[in-house]
Image (cartoon, helix red, strand yellow):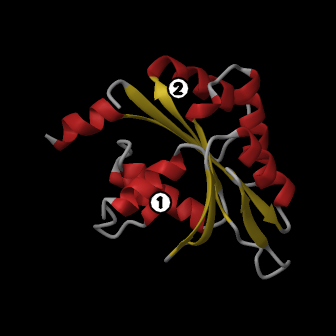
Amino acid sequence: MSGQNALVAVYDTHFGAEEAVKKLQRAGIDMRTLSIVGKDSHTEEDPVGYYNTGDRMKYWGKSGAFWGGFWGLLFGSAFFAIPGIGPVLAAGPVVAWIVGALEGAAVVGGVSALGAGLSSIGIPRDSVVQYEMAVSTDKFLVMVNGRASEVETARDVLGSTKPFSVATHSRERVVAAAR
């Protein structure tokens, strides 16, 4: 993971997150570096169903078209019930980060499985707490994890999408600070 940086943009709505992903794709960002996380906050309003067909997960519910589009575009998809946050949908490499943290029993120190997954790629604890809070309050995370040049290009692209917040995290800075 050396030389990797992470960009995390927070969006108030799924429309903003969707626009961001489309702009990143048009800009040539490698879709294998892109992740999205959001809370499934509408389970009380509509019947919701999840099922898996081969390597693709399907979603029925209020935001089905939104999530279905990402699951066809991004690599990996999952549904997690995270204590303190609630039902969370995720697509992209973040799924592997969360699963890796769960399998490695890395969920410690008051962070959720989502937080442990984000920490595993070098995102500092104070930022992790902010991102967990964003998801728990129905915001969406759009993330790019890759080379510094690709992350900088993504940052430029996302600037035009009016995110609630956007931050770049360098794995090298986090490792150096921990020493």
Q: Is residue 128 visible?
A: no
Q: Nearer the viewer, residue 170 or 96?
A: 96
Q: Is residue 77 visible?
A: yes
Image location (x, y in percent) of residue 38: 65, 58
Residue found farthest to the front: 54
Q: Label 2, secondary structure: give it.
A: helix
Instruction: Tell me which numbered mark, 1 or 2, is placed earlier along the sequence.
Output: 1
Instruction: Tell me where residue 16 sits by quadrant.
Output: top right
* Residue beneath disc 2: 151
Identity of the amino acid at label 1? Leu
Q: Label 1, secondary structure: give it.
A: helix
Instruction: Tell me where residue 140 sits by quadrant.
Output: bottom right
**With respect to residue 38, does 94 lie above or below?**
above
Check the picture and name the quadrant holding the N terminus: top left
Image location (x, y in percent) of residue 25: 73, 27
Residue neighbourhood size for the residue with mark 1, other residues' Cα within 10 Å, grouped as few (<14), some (14–19), many (≥20): many
Identity of the amino acid at label 2? Val
- Residue located at (50% from left, 61% from top): 132
Residue neighbourhood size for the residue with mark 2, other residues' Cα within 10 Å, grouped as few (<14), some (14–19), many (≥20): many
Which label was assigned to residue 154?
none
Of circles 1 and 2, the one toward us is: 1
* Residue beneath disc 1: 114
**With respect to residue 148, does 116 lie above or below?**
below
Left or right: where 100 falls relative to 36: left
Image location (x, y in percent) of residue 136: 58, 68
Left or right: where 119 falls relative to 164: left
Check the picture and name the quadrant holding the C terminus: top left
- Residue located at (70% from left, 68% from top): 40
- Residue located at (59% from left, 20% from top): 153
- Residues under numbered marks 1 and 2 in contact, where contact means CB atoms less than 8 Å apart: no
Total numbered circles: 2
